[in-house]
Amino acid sequence: MVDVYIDPHVHMVSRTTDDYVRMARAGCVAITEPAFWAGYDRSSPKGFFDYFRQLTEFEPRRAAQYGIRHHTWLCINPKEAEDPVFAREVIGLIPGFLERENVLGIGEIGLNKNSRNELEILEAHLQLASDHGLLVLVHTPHLEDKLKGTRLIMDAIRRFPKLDPGRVLIDHVEEHTVGHVLDRGFWCGMTLYPDTKCTPQRAVDIIECWGSERIWMNSAGDWGHSDPIAVPKAQMEMRRRGHLESLVRRVTFENPERFLSQSGRFSAQPLRPTAPDVTR
Ligand SMILES: [Zn+2]
């Protein structure tokens, strides 16, 4: 049985058209793609101007060929935030893209090594989101400092009273951080990686322990070892354990739709695949 789903965090610029085909066949109708690290540091802030064009112009057209609606988030990621002058120049480019129709907000911002410079640039992004009333998608560190980083990030967000926790999603939660995030009123994302972060099995365990309010799953598929159809694999795991279809649908479709629709730009309505782009 194939049910529709949303993958709210996947880096399609680093995936192939075969992945789009597999996702569409598995029921994916809409995705959101946060700006992230390219696997190497860009040599100039202007590299981000081109990346933001790719995320707002080319990638939505590519996704539409497979009947998938593409949305995006803009930022400079924490891995490239160690040079605040460079990072502030990139942040200065973002307002020029905020009116583009597939832009949902600021993301994925956050911390990587929990450094002072990263925190400064995190706050600059939060200021931008606060000034423009934007949704925020937050990356939490993958290192052993995940809990400390998650707390630092939530404390930073609290310093911006206009940022409602109900409009902020804290991603890559694990067993030891999910409760802290939910308790403070934020939304949670579980990232389904084949080996690190959450496997589909661990994500379903977390739902069984913490419930299905303000929580979603994503593949975070990127240029590393990752699985762009991890969300339907988690759906299968839920069915295998005998969970109701209504619960499967809630965490893999209705919850992301509810959070993302706060942007006023998100749609998961069926999209007829468009003709292939033959400009190449
Ligand atoms: Zn990511």
Image (cartoon, rainbow, N blue to C red):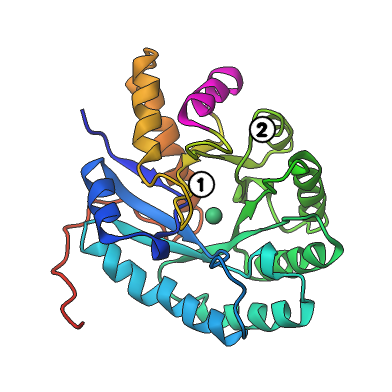
Mark number displayed over residue 178: 2
Decide if residue 232 is on the left or right side of residue 48: left
Location of residue 179 with respect to 79 vertically, above or below: above
Chain part drawn in magenta: 199-212
- Name the amino acid, label 1: Phe
The residue wearing badge 1 is 259
Mark 1: few, some, or many residues within 10 Å (few <14, many ≥20)?
Answer: some
Q: Position of residue 165 (x, y in %)?
A: 68, 47
Q: Quadrant of residue 127?
A: bottom right
- Cβ of mark 1 under 8 A from ligand 1: no
Q: Is residue 253 visible?
A: no
What SS does tag 1 mark? helix
- State the residue in front, 239 or 135: 239
What quarter of the picture does the C terminus occupy?
bottom left
Decide if residue 264 is on the left or right side of residue 187: left
Location of residue 42 with respect to 239 vertically, above or below: below
What SS does tag 2 mark? helix
Q: Quadrant of residue 44?
A: bottom right
Q: Quadrant of ligand 1?
A: bottom right
Q: Position of residue 226 (x, y in %)?
A: 45, 46
Rounded to the nearest angstrom, the CA distance separating label 2 from label 1 is 17 Å
Camera-near label (2 vs 1) is 2
The residue positioned farthest toward the right in the image shown: 116
